[in-house]
Amino acid sequence: MIEVSGLTVRFGGVTSLDGMSVTFESGTCGLIGPNGAGKTTFFNVLSGFVRPASGSVTAFGEDLLGMAHFRRARWGVRRTFQTEQAIENLTVYENVAMIHEHSKLSGSTRQEDVLGAISIVGLDDVANTKVRTLGAGQRRLVEVARAIVGKPKLVLLDEPAAGLPEAETAHLGEVIRGIPEHTGAMTILVDHDMSLVSSCCENTAVLDFGKMIASGPTAEVLRNEQVVRAYLGAAEEAA
Amino acid sequence: MASTAQLTSETKPASPPSAPPRWERGFWTRAVIIAVAILLVLILLPQILSLYYVDAMTQVAIYSVVALGLGVLVGRVGLISLGQAAVLAIGAWVAARLLFATSLPFEVVLLAAGVITMLLGTLVGLPALRMRGLYLALITLMLAGAITIVLASLNFPNGGHGFSGYNGALLHIPPIRRPGIAQTDPAYFRYSVVAAVIMFLLVLIHVRTKPGRAWAAIRQSEPAALAAGINTTMYKLWAFALASFVTGVAGGVLAGAVRYLYSIDFATQDSIILLAVVLMGGAYSIWGAIVAGLLYQLLPAILNDIGISPDWLTILFGIGVLQVLTTAPTGIVDQLPKDIARLGRFIGGLGRRSSPAKEPAQ
């Protein structure tokens, strides 16, 4: 369970998160909202890249904000990035094995575990291939494998389907739906692809201008008038 | 998803090894070829070269190690340091001081120079924890300037007493001593090459193992490295420590090579030229450091030999860096084999075109 309370992040004069309070219970939860709503900022706070002005985050009873950023990854907070960041000059295996190399997980299970994660995302054939030769979809999957290897507690997926063709998004959806079963980790999925979010997440929370405007079962949230207005309103203005 | 879970256990027996295959494939063949090449350099070069060029090649060995250290920072971690000439000066100063003040074996002095330089060089790296790119370059350049000024006022040890070991009133300045087994220039050349080989091995081990992979992650994306649980602060300092250690050892070897040290030999702008030759040689490859050493020391020696001022090299290096940055970002060491292969294909293509009669026959 992740309890977020009164989380505020300011960048100069811009308030990116404005007293955000939400509880993510378990399983795979969606986090949606228009561009600039603060979703990535929230992930950055959880992974320690951004220090909030105020507020608290408790993950599975642990005060997350008191932990150094690299320790959070070792402890079990893992993530992917909006712009994919698999390490190009390393192989898929080396990318995924990295977390094991830098945490104190035991060596004997390491290879099994890494190969297991690679297998879950379906990259067995390219395990020893350098990431720079892979396509965009496969690179996304490398990031996902890196996030789910070695007993993570919380997996943050930041727009994993952005820019992927339909078939690859479908495969990604399958992988995401399998995360609880394979790792037991809680997952928070940020994406603009509503069919992906509704097929993966029982519950969804909605951020708009740094504030939570709705949360609850995904189907209900997507029908919520305020949510529809936040999305369509933005669309109309853009048009 | 159950099917994928099964897939996991099924594919395990045929699973790839934890070490990447390139580490094993052809590893011994390559190691033997490299060992033979080193032996040839050690035995043949002093035989066929004049003393002038043997001395130049000693400098090449020394500066290849300096370039190697800078290559670790620039190529592996993506940290630009413009202070390496000053780091080299620290190594040379410490070694010279110890060689005059003590009767420690030369190897111990080299090790001490490496370790002390490592500690000071890591301090130079502290700003790197907060900044990158242009600002880090500027800070390291200023620090290098500061170190140069301090060394200029302290002077290099010349056999005097006290902390600085400098005595301006000395009439007969004793040369910095060399190891017993390497008194002559050809012997010292061999000694320098062996020291350089050990430094190359040290760096090679680093880049092919855990720190190398951590550096690769940091270079590409610090957030991604942090998200993989990498202590980026420690690994950046580790890179500075390694680069400073090898540069410090190179400084010690340099002290024995030139035998008289002056602060004027470690000009701040040398660091800039060093970065230029490292980029030209190839910052992403260990072997690029050797090319950089040759560009930095052999090329001026050749120009001097044929009566052209080596100062012209600054212009040449400028053009070289421009060329590398625009057309061959991986440097000469990567580009030259490709160009040769391309030339081979071109010549092969010419050959095929000139004998078209064969093709219809097939």
Image: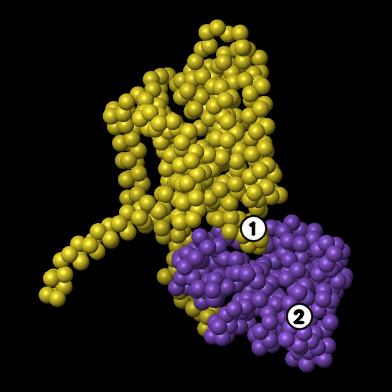
- Residue at disc 2, secondary structure: loop
Kindly check if marks 1 and 2 are in contact, taking CB atoms under 8 A apart as contact: no
Which x, y percent locates residue B211? 56, 51
Q: CA distance from mark 1 to mark 2?
A: 27 Å
Looking at the picture, does residue A224 appear above or below residue A39? below
Chain B, hue in figure: yellow
**Residue under label 2:** A33
- Residue at disc 1, secondary structure: helix
**Chain for numbered disc 2:** A
| Colouring chosen for the image of the structure | by chain
Chain A, hue in figure: purple
Q: In this view of the protein, can residue A175 be seen by the observer?
A: no
Q: In this view of the protein, can residue A207 be seen by the observer?
A: yes
Quarter of image, res B127: top right
Quarter placement of the C terminus of chain B: bottom left
Nearer to the camera, B12 or B215: B215
Which x, y percent locates residue A131? 50, 66
**Residue under label 1:** B222
For image coordinates 46% across by 70% down, the residue present is: A126
Residue B45's label in the rendered image is none
Which x, y percent locates residue A186? 70, 75
How dense is the environment of label 2, judged by Cα within 10 Å: few (below 14), some, or many (20 and up)? many
Give, as a three-letter code, the residue at label 2. Gly
Give, as a three-letter code, the residue at label 1. Glu
**Chain for numbered disc 1:** B
Nearer to the camera, B68 or A1: B68
